[in-house]
Image (tube, grey):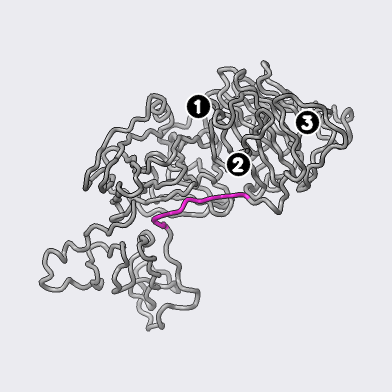
Amino acid sequence: MAREFQRGHKAKISDLTAGTDLYVGVSIAGPGLTFDISCFGLDANEQLSDDRYFVFYNQPKSPEESIQQLGAQAGDSESFRVTLDRIPAGIHRLSFTASVDGAGQMSQIGPGYIRIVAGGEEVVRYSFTGSEFSTERALMIGDFYLKDVWRFAAVGQGFDGGLAALLKNFGGEVAEEEAAPEQQVPAQATGAPGFAPPPQAAAPAPSFGAPAQAPAQAPAPAAAFAAPPQPAAHQPAAPQQQPVHSAPTMVGPLTTPPAAPYGQPPHPPQQPGPPSYGQVPGRQPGYGGQVPPPAPAPAPYGQQPAYGQQPPYGQQPSYGQQPPYGQAPGQVPGQQPAAGAGLAAALQPYKEAPTGARWTPQNQQLMRVDLSMGGQAVLARQGSMVLYQGKVDFSYKGAGFAGRIVGNATGQEMQLMRCTGRGQVFLAETGAHLHAIELQGDGICVSAENVLAFDESLQHEVRRIEGHGIPGGALFTMQFQGSGTVIVKTHGVPVVLPVTPTTFADSNAIVAWSSASQVIISSQVRLRRNAYPGHSGETVNLQFRGAPGNFIVVQPYEV
């Protein structure tokens, strides 16, 4: 049974199939659109150092035929044969792409997919729809990449520009003769695009949204590696398939409580007083104004309040909620503790938060993990332990030789310690604000320098941000996936924003983003090759795109 991938999912080819002679099928269609579907054979630097490994309609195979373009068949718009054990040692990545030929955008496409077939059986499929994209004219669909062994990754990332822009992005050169293919149009069938598949594909590509129709006559027998015929009902219809986008659950919410409805003050209006310093006339004032701030709704039993949220005026904090700094429980702000309260009352505001959860913030800068809950180890940054209780063992967690090489090369190296046993460990680092983000089978991307600790059950690896020329070494990030919690550090109080087609962030201020988001390099000025580390970074931004549910986290600080 084929495994269904979502954007960002990765797997070893050996976990999918024991074969190395693979069939790759791509389906993409849109009303009035034609597409160039290609495969780029890239080197270790993800560059097209040998243009003979750019397999497309004008060059349908590589020199040793380890990559072959087969044309449309078995319900696929385009298909390839990939023989992994014949790929030369200099090729480290095969990137399968689609670009619009002529006018059009990727937001106009219907349901599409990329699939891998081995031994006549489909082993993996990644599906996508046009609702995941906007104005992009090219799409990086999926990659085979060499990391110890060959692996497959569902990419699903849009790209501004067509096939020529993709070629330049991978370091290739665009030929000047653009008129040559147009002179061959009279020799082709009427209405067929210049890059049409070989004549053996008798039936044209199916119309947008319609299921593929079986040919009237029996097709010629396919090779042993070819894909099985795909039934007509298996072709997805536009109204029936929706993209799946999962966003991590934020354990410590970073959003502020909702305000009162417009025009409905939470208290009767009072006599207006003089505006506070810096207050804009006509805007709801804060302290000293005419209307006190609305009382936020208390958090559910056992749940931590929103980050920075305080209990209502004069109200006892709920279970697990700490009172404001320096204020004793039940004490009205602005009043002194009762006379004779003694030392216990003075220290009451700083008592340990009640237990009951595996990860519990003690204040903005201190996090406690209870190792006896969950029965799994915690990986934390070396030197971040400030206190522990119970029987806890600490050991060095090495990344291995290959991990150190990758960490040094990408700037995503983490010096970790492994915490095991039955007890409680308190973690902090340089007064940074700490936030617990719980993952429930989804993923999040965080730079290694913003990670304090995480559950060992989470899978983590270095992920490359597609694009070139970001100054300051911001080309890589850490991606965490699975079920567990990761503790993220920020300088100051962060802000969480939903991802829209016009969301841009400074590459030095971004903290984290949902792994399902698309990241595109955006520059307001022309990038120069002599960009150097330590550059201000203001000329280069990261543009984020994705369906509703995706988010980014930005801190009020530039690294």
Nearest the viewer among 557 and 368 is 368
Which percent across, then down, holds residue 470? 49, 36
Identify the element where label 2 is drawn.
strand
Which percent across, then down, holds residue 489? 36, 47
Residue at the spot 59% in from the left edge and 29% down from the top edge: 17
Query: Which residue is under mark 3?
Result: 195
Q: Distance between the residues labelled 3 and 2?
A: 30 Å
| Neighbourhood count class around disc 3 (C-alpha, 10 Å): few under 14, some 14–19, many 20 upward | some
Q: Which amino acid does label 1 sit on?
A: Lys
**Quick check: 25 left or right of 142?**
right
Highlighted range, magenta: 243-254
Q: Which of marks 3 and 2 is nearer the N terminus?
A: 2
Mark 3 vs 2: CB contact within 8 A: no
151 in the magenta segment: no
- Checking the image for residue 4, the label placed there is 2
In front: mark 3 or mark 1? 1
Nearest the viewer among 220 and 176 is 220
Q: How far apart are marks 1 and 2 (CA)?
A: 22 Å
Q: Can residue 471 be seen in this view?
A: no
Identify the element where label 3 is drawn.
loop
